[in-house]
Amino acid sequence: MERGRMSRATGRQSELPMRVQDNNRTSMVYTTPQSKQPSFGKLNIPKPQSVTSERRTSFFGGRTSGASMPRNSIMSGFGGSEKIKDARPLHDKSFVQQCIRQLHEFLTEQGYPGTLVAKTLQSPSTKEFVKMFEFIYCQLDPTFEMPNSKVEEEVPAILKSLRYPFVLSKCSMYSVGAPHTWPQALGALMWLIDNVKINWSLSRQELLFSDFSEDGDNLEEGSDYNKLLLDYTAETYSKFMQGDDTFEDEDESFLNKLKKLYNVDEALLMSMEEKHRILSEEVEQLEKESQTDRLMTKRMERMKLQADLKKLQSYRSSLDSFKANLENKASELKDELENTVSHLESLKHERDELQQLLQNQKFTPADVERINREKRELQQTISSLSKSLEEAEQHKWNEEIALAKVKEKAELKLAEYHKLARKLKLIPLSAENACGHDFEFRPFELGPGGMVQHKTQIQMLLRKLVSDVEEENSRLANMKLSLDESCEQVNSNILDKSNDLKQLREQIRKLDERLGSDMQELAREEQDWAEEMESVENHRKLLEKKVTYGYDEAVQQLKAAQQQYHLVLQETNEERRTVANNLASVFTTAANHLSITEKCLDDLHSRVQRGCYKAVEEDEAAVQKLRETLKSFVSKANTL
């Protein structure tokens, strides 16, 4: 768990990179996913708008590696030519998944233009990796453009220029999505994201004093500032050499002196912070509002309007046909009215003639009574005919309304049938499941007999399609059974391999025991030789005491004993080195073979399991889709 923290909550205003306090004195750059507040030095990214940024970052050199700085060094930078072991658990699946989630969140928040899919981030291609790398690096350098050629050389070169502490080989760029190369590439992306966040935080810190002087670019120019900086550097460095890692008092004093030097207005600073907070809240609110896809909403509205337009067009066509029928009926009524008018004129003319005749002749009372009776009969006949005409017109109107309702219901059912047929890809003729047959009803184009014949033909085609679907369903069921059997066979093979792995582990354990016993035997032999050497030394001392009695003989015996000792010691060392080398090679070979076997078995098991799961899910989805299609066909057939 990281223990390094910033010296103050408001951010470090010091010109020197802050040391990180950790158990092993390692930089927090190696704890990428857990880093919430990185605390190493500022990136040496060129910024044309700031003249003093380069001086800030290069005062004591870059400190990007994890090696701790010796206390007696003066200005040597961190990181050398030696290779540094990556302490991040990049081969831990949970760690890799956590890194992928953080990468997805960062790209989503920053508006990554490409498509982000969880499956793509699990094993991306080289092209997708280069796009993500270019997008993240553009957060540091907006003018950067990735070249079209030699991308495999450009990405490692950029990471090396940014002082990435680990090596991302050129060969790994050809297969970024491979299981053995993707964790290293993902670690490089997370390191680059951490640098982007640090750059943002330091950029925000540089803006704290941007409004407190008339010339913001020359803020740190002048002898007063240089004197304050040198005094602060001397004090902090002296404490640093004494073993301190934090300089809170010196930072506070240096900050107060800077505020006094540049006449910092605390009230203005507080007002600017409040303004920044308000603007941040407005930006968050705007981002939340922009998350709703307005284009999708407009598209949905357009689809609804198009559907309404189609309905209106169909309704308009029905109204046109109804209008044509009414016009035909109106023309017929007009002809009938003209005939009636001509008949009425002839009746009027006849009435006039009869009236003239009546005026010219004399009627008897019997004739008058007869005429009045005929008149009443004619009036009753006219009233009854008028009533019959009104009833006929009312009945005609009611029949037309009922016909319109029935026609509307038929059009709704026909639209529902066409919609379902389009979902099932049966309409138009070039659809996937149409097979060259016409499943579309055209009630206004065909007559009653043609409509019945077309309906019978469609029912026969649908029954044939249902039978084909049932056959396909049975075939998929048989295929699923065969896949289940193959899955069981693969599981049995995995069980056999696991048993072989247990046997190999038992053999390794026996080799470990044998190695321990050999080491103990070698230790006992060394102890015996030490005792023998001690006895020889005692004998030599005894011979030295008796040198007056046989100096020459003692010297010869001593030389012989020494030669014998060296010879035996050399043979013993040679034999011990040979045995140790043999045992080490045997143990290394067994361990490598075990690791390779475990890796192969894990890869095989994961591939087989993914294949089985994918096949089973696809089969189940296909079977479920076919069942739903069958049910819909059966229901439609029943309704038809």
Image: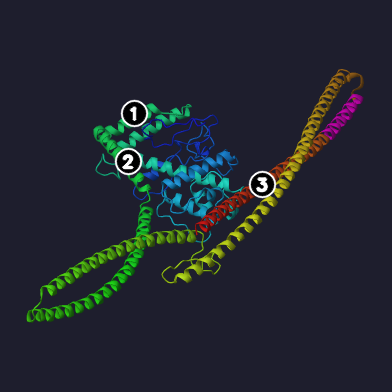
Q: Nearer the viewer, mark 2 or mark 3?
A: 3
Q: Residues within 10 Å of mark 1 (few under 14, many from 20)?
A: few
> In the rendered view, would you say 334 is above or below 412?
below
Question: Residue tagged by mark 3?
Answer: 603
Is residue 85 visible in the rendered image? The answer is no
C-alpha gap between disc 1 and disc 2: 30 Å
Give residue 551's position: percent from left, percent from top: 89, 23
Q: Earlier in the sequence, mark 3 or mark 1?
A: 1
- Does residue 519 appear left or right of residue 112 in this picture? right
Q: Nearer the viewer, residue 456 or 12?
A: 456
Q: Earlier in the sequence, mark 2 or mark 3?
A: 2
C-alpha gap between disc 3 and disc 1: 59 Å
Q: Residues within 10 Å of mark 2 (few under 14, many from 20)?
A: few
Q: Nearer the viewer, residue 377 or 397?
A: 377
Question: Residue tagged by mark 2?
Answer: 280
Residue 253's disc is 1
